[in-house]
Image (cartoon, rainbow, N blue to C red):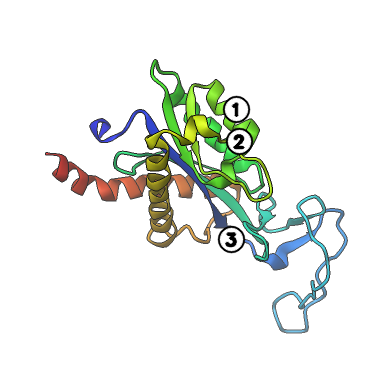
Amino acid sequence: MKRLLSSDHFSVDGTLIEAWASMKSVRPRDGSGDPPPSSPGSGRNGEADFHGHKRSNATHASTTDPEARLYKKGKGKEAKLCFMGHSLMENRHGLIVDACLTPADGHAERVAALCMIEPHADRPLPITLGADKGYDAEDFVNELRTMGVTPHVAQNQSGRRSGIDGRTTRHPGYAISLRIRKRIEEAFGWIKTVGGQRKSRFKGLDRVGWAFTFAATAYNLVRLPRLLAETH
């Protein structure tokens, strides 16, 4: 399998994994806001109206899965209880070379990316890391360069200055990386649909993380027979 992998060109991305816990399980951390009593014979908690109530991870947590976090990955989208799965893909054949799961927050993708690329950065020749514009942060780009990794990150120029400049974008390899990095979405699509990870069936960071990593491994195994046949 090693001969199928690129050792110098990689891509990274993150995706939300919806927690098994229901939004009805979210309660204030101070113990207030207990669910209303159930009606006789109903066998379940009474309905609660959360309309107009502000809930955040600082003030609220799920009683079913306390490690799940309220998060939304875009303006205008509904916040959900979820975790964040991360994958590092090699660019030759689009195989996943590392995967992990973290609590969902705005910095998780960049922190996970640095952790996953670090073992591959200790090499005589520089390597590249492709990523979408969500990774375009000056501290992240500078940290990659310190590690000897060329940041092939899509520029985010919407009302701000991009951390990626002409010393990176002028090279033909930059455009190639931006095109190839989109293949990681194919892996996420398989992991969520065929691998059943769109909504986890487990609770807790460790168990949900195990299931996510297992599904990423299965994605590689499913693709291996055809890749091996093509390279013979």
Q: Which residue is label 2 attached to? A: 163
Q: Which residue is label 3 attached to? A: 20
Judge by depth and name the residue closer to the eye, 153 or 22. Answer: 153
Residue plotted at (21% across, 45% down): 227
Crowding at dot 1, Cα within 10 Å, few <14 / some 14-19 / many 20+, comes out as some
- At mark 1, the secondary structure is helix
Tag 1: amino acid? Asn
Res 12 label:
none
- At mark 3, the secondary structure is loop
Distance, label 2 to label 1, CA atoms, is: 8 Å
Q: Which residue is label 1 attached to? A: 142
Distance, label 3 to label 2, CA atoms, is: 37 Å
Q: Of the residues tagged 2 and 1, which is closer to the observer?
A: 2
- Dot 1 or dot 3: first in sequence order is 3
Are circles 2 and 1 on residues that touch, CB within 8 Å? yes
Residue plotted at (71% across, 76% down): 44
Residue plotted at (72% across, 57% down): 62
